[in-house]
Image (cartoon, rainbow, N blue to C red):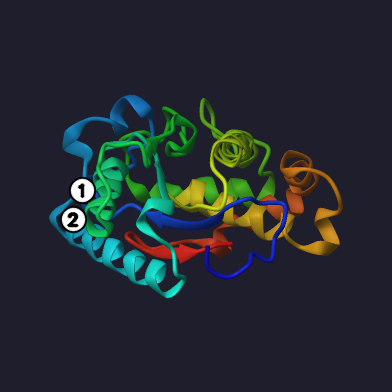
Amino acid sequence: MGEERSTPFLRNRYWILRHGKSVPNARGIIVSSLENGIVAEFGLAPEGVTQARLAGEQFLKALKESDVRPEDVRICYSPFSRTSQTAEAVANAIGIPFPGAQCKAMEELRERFFGPSFELLSHDKYAEIWALDEIDPFRPPEGGESVADVVFRLTAALTAIEAEFQRCAILLVCHGDPLQIFQTIIDAAKDKTSSGDGGLESRIKRVTVPSILSQHRRFALLTGELRHVV
């Protein structure tokens, strides 16, 4: 299936997609709890619908350039309404059924929960969280998830995907912070100087350290942005 991967510790190739612009994005509020995130009113804004469609077309082009057949694609997505709608738009663009066997909702890919002190408040407060992350990525906002907490569940998701699929093109449709964190750990784990021998979980565990996790913001994505990670 296309060119050979440069990271033999993974059985699949991975693309990531941050959801299209959502109603919370447009309103400038934080919606990070699963309870609020699945509510239909917090889905995609009209601009986000367009972004999701365009991302689907971009992904289809990337697949064709890599000689990937649609039947070799798997879309794994957060159950939040904004990510589910984005995943559906991509599935429609590449011609696979949604819902269907090739599309898998995974709670482990949900948004990072920033805690009750931030939920439904202004997104300007993200700066407070990211400042805390730089100081100590193992320290969560009160009642919320730390960067390390997100690493733990992303590792569980990645391990499950790698166990279920082989030589597939995997698209993760997810949220800003989890995707920043995902890129951070994959970038470090695939580095031959830091990964060493061993399986996926042991590689990620070795790079789950403050000096690496505190830098996750350098991998920030725009809404509707698609990236080939590995």
Q: Is residue 47 above or below residue 11?
A: below
Nearest the eye: 132 or 155: 155
Q: Amino acid at mark 1?
A: Leu
Q: Which mark is residue 49?
A: 2
Q: 60 left or right of 172?
A: left
Residue at 36% across, 33% down:
119
How far across and how far down the image is residue 25, in percent?
A: 27, 51
Neighbourhood count class around disc 1 (C-alpha, 10 Å): few under 14, some 14–19, many 20 upward = many
- Asked if residue 128 can be seen in this view, the reply is no
With respect to residue 31, does 143 lie above or below?
A: above
Q: Secondary structure at mark 1?
A: loop
Could you tell me residue 62's position as x and y percent? Answer: 40, 70
| Residue appearing at x 32%, y 24% in the figure | 35
Distance, label 1 to label 2, CA atoms, is 6 Å
Q: Secondary structure at mark 2?
A: helix
| Vertical relation: 117 (above or below) 16 | above
- What's the residue type where badge 2 is placed? Val
Pointer 1 with pointer 2, Cβ within 8 A? yes
Rendered image quadrant of residue 100:
top left
Residue 178, label in figure:
none
Work out whether residue 11 can be spotted. yes
Q: Nearer the viewer, residue 218 or 29?
A: 218
Number of callouts in the render? 2
Residue at the outermost bottom position = 65
Q: Position of residue 210 (x, y in %)?
A: 74, 48
What residue do we see at 76% from left, 41% from top? 205
Q: Quadrant of residue 198?
A: top right
Residue at which label 1 appears: 44
Q: Say whether disc 1 or disc 2 marks the residue closer to the N-terminus.
A: 1
